[in-house]
């Protein structure tokens, strides 16, 4: 594979990445966790549009199913854990190419959230709060929660939430996965890894399964070695120093790979395909501040460095016919960047 880097803009504390589709065209999204803007990039030259100038504090951005480019996003979650006023906003594209943004939910300390679909086609909101209250950044005495609720037909209607699980210390990581043949949510915290699966019928109950009790910061799930079984790819513990791949055996989830060099402030973990090859992408915000990928080759996991020095916070991937695009927030150097992957 060939990887070419393209810097889109400098963006202080660049943190959140995503994409959305408008009129059949994929648009790339970046936002800062600091006080500042969110940007959209599109077209062959990746032209920039400002979605909002502020307030910022964006942790996550998620397209709304069945709408034409609309997405929800976290705002007001500022460093370091200054997020008692965190909100979910609705960003809506206008006919003139501009955007309007409306606050639809106040959810203190919401860090990750998603919109997932049940087996019956009903869409649900799931929100994960880092904690429930704080007196200072070192105070973890009031653990976080998982909130869930049905997504209303109109976003002008309030989302009614209830607590699916509480008592989750340092409730930081999230990944949408296919779990037991259904769309589900992996949630990670000091208590371990939990799989939350939406109801199979409207008005039904969510299921919640604890996968393990290993303190975990972030997670992805994928069949990287091609044996037909999914692996857990995790950063352990909170903002951790271990990047591991775990395979399920008769005695539980055991390590089959660990990042071989020193790691500090691990923050990126993604699983999917690059040019059709099962791939893990990882990264850390300190030490070498590297972004890397791992593939299974000739019976072993092989790590390849994409770049050092960026200190990435999050990545997303857009797979295409001629190329794949890694959307990366190089948070520590304030850089919104694409890594364009070709054969």
Image (spheres, helix red, strand yellow):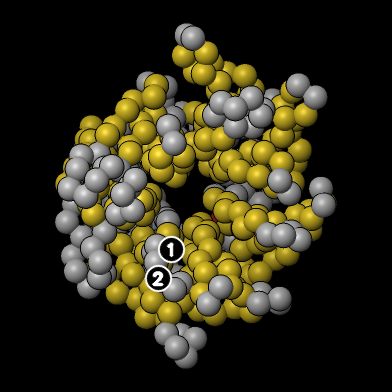
Task: Point out residue 309 in the picture as x, y percentages from the top left corner.
Answer: 69, 48
**Residue closest to the eye, 261 or 339:** 339
Q: Residues within 10 Å of mark 1 (few under 14, many from 20)?
A: many
**Residue 63, disc:** 1
Instruction: Give x and y (percent) for residue 49.
Output: 54, 80
On screen, residue 299 above or below 27: above
Q: Residue at x 23, y 32 (%)?
A: 167
Badge nearest the viewer, 2 or 1: 2
Residue at position x 63%, y 70% in the image: 9
Whether pointer 2 and pointer 1 mark residues with C-beta atoms closer than 8 Å, the reply is yes
Picture coordinates of residue 259, whole percent (x, y): 65, 28
Image point (72%, 30%), residue name: 296
Residue 174 at least partly seen: no
Residue 202 visible from this viewpoint = yes
- When asked about the image quadrant of residue 83, the answer is bottom left
Disc 2: CA contacts within 10 A as few (<14), some (14-19) or many (>=20): few
Dot 2 corresponds to which residue? 67
């Amino acid at each position: 594979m060939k990887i070419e880097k393209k810097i889109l803009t400098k963006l202080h504390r660049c943190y959140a990445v995503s994409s959305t589709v408008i009129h059949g065209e994929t648009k790339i999204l970046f936002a800062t966790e600091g006080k500042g803007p969110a940007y959209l990039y599109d077209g062959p030259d990746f032209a920039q549009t400002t979605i909002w100038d502020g307030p910022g504090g964006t942790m996550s951005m998620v397209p709304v199913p069945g709408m034409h480019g609309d997405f929800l996003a976290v705002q007001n979650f500022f460093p370091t854990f200054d997020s008692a006023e965190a909100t979910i906003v609705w960003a809506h594209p206008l006919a003139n190419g501009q955007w309007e943004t409306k606050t639809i939910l106040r959810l203190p300390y919401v860090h990750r959230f998603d919109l997932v679909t049940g087996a019956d086609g009903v869409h649900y909101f799931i929100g994960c709060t880092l904690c429930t209250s704080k007196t200072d950044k070192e105070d973890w005495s009031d653990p976080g929660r998982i909130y869930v609720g049905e997504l209303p037909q109109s976003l002008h209607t309030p989302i009614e939430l209830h607590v699916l699980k509480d008592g989750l210390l340092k409730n930081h990581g999230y990944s949408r996965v296919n779990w037991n043949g259904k769309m589900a949510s992996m949630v990670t915290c000091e208590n371990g890894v939990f799989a939350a699966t939406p109801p199979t019928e409207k008005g039904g109950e969510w299921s919640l399964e604890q996968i393990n009790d290993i303190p975990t910061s972030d997670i992805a799930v994928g069949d990287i070695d091609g044996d037909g079984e999914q692996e857990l790819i995790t950063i352990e513990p909170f903002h951790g120093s271990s990047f591991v791949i775990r395979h399920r055996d008769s005695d539980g989830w055991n390590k089959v790979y660990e990042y071989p060099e020193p790691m500090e402030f691990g923050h990126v973990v993604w699983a999917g395909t690059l040019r059709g090859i099962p791939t893990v992408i990882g990264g850390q915000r300190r030490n070498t501040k590297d972004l890397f990928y791992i593939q299974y080759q000739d019976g072993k996991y092989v790590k390849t460095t994409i770049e050092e020095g960026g200190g990435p916070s999050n990545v997303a991937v857009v797979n295409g016919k001629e190329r794949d695009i890694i959307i990366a927030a190089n948070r520590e150097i304030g850089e919104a960047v694409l890594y364009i992957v070709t054969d």
